[in-house]
Amino acid sequence: MTSSLQSHPADALPDPWPQCMARLAAELPQEEVHTWLKPLQSKPQSRGLVLFAPNAFVLDEVRARYLPRIRELLNHFAGSPEVQLEIGTLPSSRPASPSASMHRPTPMPAAEPFVGNMDTHYSFDNFVEGRSNQMARAAAWQAAQKPGDRLHNPLLLYGGTGLGKTHLMFAAGNEMRRLNPGARVLYMRSNEFYNEFFRALQDRTADQFKRRFQNIDALLLDDIQFFAGKDRTQEEFFHTFNTLFDGKQQIILTCDRYPREVEGLEPRLKSRLAWGLSVAIDPPDFETRAQIVLAKARERGVQLPEDVAFLLAKRMHSNVRDLEGALNTLAARANFTGKQITAEFAQDTLRDLLRAQQASVSIPNIQKTVADYYGLPLRELLSKRRTRSLARPRQVAMALAKELTEHSLPEIGDAFGGRDHTTVLHACKQVRNLIATDAKLHEDWDKLLRKLTE
Ligand SMILES: Nc1ncnc2c1ncn2[C@@H]1O[C@H](COP(=O)(O)OP(=O)(O)OP(=O)(O)O)[C@@H](O)[C@H]1O
């Protein structure tokens, strides 16, 4: 694209992009912001700015979906709507030349026979899809269908613990091997990469270490936040990454948050991680949690009545691993005692666990968290005033109390300044409808859920 914007030393100009981003982040669902907008890098110009997208995929989406709004915001914050979209990274973070950055160890002896290490249990079939993970699932599926394609190489899956990132990563690797049984897919945890690299340095077998990555078709590297602050390992991984990327070998990575937010990761590595596709996995909603626990029970041959699945899904919202742990405990005790799993049996067996989950989410805690989130005094949230700026946050707080606690509608009404139970019911319905239709409220809901349950 040719520039109609006047070039200027970027350092000297104020960058309106952070303000635009803050506004976009408040307007759009978090998934969209992370996937399409956060990978952009900005370079202010004397009028407007240039936005660098890491690849054509991001560029096309930004152009099609967000450009008009970006122009409006730029006009508002910088007095000019001029924006130019380009593929690439900021000139300062671009490597000097691809060959200079590769540091290929040469010459290298032939690679050793490949030993696969996939956990074949994890598949797309036994991954339950819901609103919180459908983009991540689709991206992993695509990567498995066309490994190495620039649209999703590297593929980065990020999100909190126990939400299915490793599961999807293995599912993609297993699918690659189903489609191409000879595919050499290597799975590694980041701490293994670190340990093996250091052992290789000590034993003077670094070449052997590097050879592991030669001739593989895909590398699945789990939990790359572990590299934070480990400069030497990052440097080695940087070279490994370049070699794989240049060879069009698929790279799939997971991280516990968006990598730009991981302190101690080198900027050049962060920039490379954004070259492909980064997708968030959020905590599953109630329906998905219930479906997951039922699917896990079926898989293990455990007779789990639906009401018990709903009980677990309702009371355990933090992550899927804990949910699975609760199911395992129930199954083990049922097996041991020869009893059927019923709601009573579950309440009894998981008493302490459920109580611990419950204790962390109380109505006062929800009220305070919601008031802080919307910047309202708590007494206003609980007051009788019905202005819109108070009514909506109050409805959200009531709906959260219904979702996250065992209190009845009248109890919730009482806790919100003595309101009738029909008011609480109306709030719950209203919020449920708005989550489906209003992107901003949807995002508020997800953020509040996370604050209250993590
Ligand atoms: N949507 C889902 N469908 C089925 N199982 C799921 C789903 N999400 C998570 N799980 C299960 O939850 C457990 C934890 O998932 P996983 O290990 O993939 O989490 P993670 O996001 O990689 O966590 P960590 O960051 O702690 O490594 C696994 O047993 C996985 O099968």
Image (cartoon, rainbow, N blue to C red):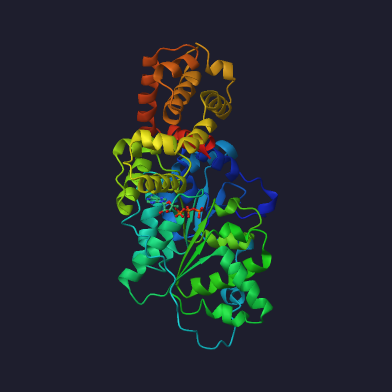
Which of the two residues, 291 or 96, is positioned nearer the viewer here? 291
Answer left or right for 56 relative to 290: right
130 relative to 138, above or below = above
Q: Quadrant of residue 21?
A: top right
Where is residue 23 drawn, in percent x and y?
Answer: 53, 37
Q: Nearer the viewer, residue 183 or 143?
A: 183
Residue 204, percent across and down? 66, 82
Residue at (58, 16) in percent of width and height: 379
State whether residue 272 appears in this view: yes
Q: Is residue 436 visible?
A: no
Q: What residue do we see at 47% from left, 11% from top?
A: 418
Q: How many marks?
A: 0
Is residue 193 depicted above or below 125 in this figure? below
- The x, y position of residue 202, in whole percent, is 68, 77
Residue located 67% across and 48% down the image: 13
The front one of 241 and 222 is 222
Residue 236 occupies which quadrant of the picture?
Answer: bottom right
Look at the picture and state if 141 lies above or below 106.
above
Q: Nearer the viewer, residue 349 or 132?
A: 349
Up-down relation of residue 283 to residue 222 (above or below)? above
